[in-house]
Amino acid sequence: MLHLSKFQALFFFPPSLIFSLMSCVDIYESRINLDIIMLLFCAKQVNILVSLHFFLAALPSAILTLNFSPYQRDIFCNDQTIKYPYKKDTISHGTMAAVTITCSIVIITTGEAFLVYKKRLHSNTKFNQYLSTLYKVVGTYLFGAAVSQSLTDLAKFTIGRPRPNFFSVCAPVSCEGLVLRSNCTGAARNVTESRLSFYSGHSSFGMYCMVFLSLYVQARMQGKWTRLARPTIQFFLVAFAVYVGYTRVSDYKHHWSDVLVGLLQGALIAVLTVRYVSDFFKQRQPLVRTTNGTEEEQLEHKPGTQPVEHGNHRNCPGPV
């Protein structure tokens, strides 16, 4: 076989052929660079859209928490339902966050890694398959959590229902007649917090997280060996959320109706998020190996120059 250097080729081949080959190489490299730029632009566009949607969903909660006070509804001095003693939280905010975040990280990261490794889950992108699928799940999860929290805070600040331990926190100088005037001696922050009973944020957030994870397990864990493992995991997830609701009643932080509505709201938002935002239950085509060694979906995908909508997610076209 004849091996020629670049300088030898200049004398061996006709100039017209050399210029033609160089033009083809330049065009091919320009096409590849254009495809890379399109992929990076599409990925950045998707990141901006996801961040924007999450920001908009969390905006009501942030505005209410930072700039507003709960509705100052009248407090009746003879209302025995708000004269319970003050108790510390059985499930504190830190414990709640630790359990939900840990369960979410372990279940989602392990599930996505296993399915991508087994080639049972894939994404129509040219980027890392695991990071792409993980990004979709986490983005959906956080979006639903922001929606749930915003709805919860909207109810809390609009209704302003006193907690069962309101009088213990308020510690009024006196309460004569039907209505308690603004004569609380307790810390102002605690008094404000004691007017945010309806509905339970612990219950709504906990139930949202656990129902979301339960539906994730239902969609991702497929196989004969999961016949009992799947409902067992789901039972413990939902049981924790229900237990959190029980503790909010026994700790005199919420009325039973606050907890019930919180549990129902969290479950509803989780179901709606999984059903209409995620692609957990999307029917996927099996992967087939192409002639160049790559794996693609069995369905034919026509190339294009614009991002394509697949369900609720945007997929960027690859090089054509």
Image (spheres, helix red, strand yellow):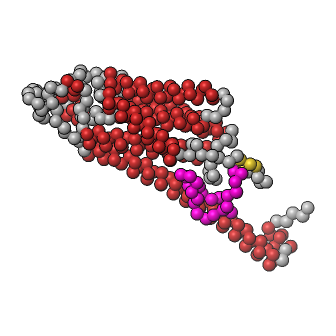
Q: Residue at x 51, y 42 (%)?
A: 274
Image-based side of 301 in relation to 180, left or right: right
Kindly give the residue lying farthest to the left in the view shown. Answer: 176
- Looking at the image, can residue 105 be seen? no
Residue 304 on the magenta segment: yes
Which image quadrant is residue 184 in? top left
Q: Residue at x 26, y 42 (%)?
A: 158
Quadrant holding the N terminus? bottom right
Q: Establish if 215 lies above or below 25.
A: above
Magenta: main secondary structure: loop
Kindly give the residue lying farthest to the bottom in the view shown. Answer: 16
Residue 162 in the image: state x and y as whole percent: 23, 32
Image-based side of 101 in relation to 38, left or right: left
Segment colored magenta: 297-320
Residue 5 in the image: state x and y as whole percent: 82, 65
Q: Residue at x 66, y 62 (%)?
A: 303
Residue 173 in the image: state x and y as whole percent: 10, 27
Quadrant holding the C terminus? bottom right
- Looking at the image, can residue 221 be seen? yes
Q: Residue at x 34, y 47 (%)?
A: 60
Q: Nearer the viewer, residue 222 or 88?
A: 222
Residue 289 on the magenta segment: no
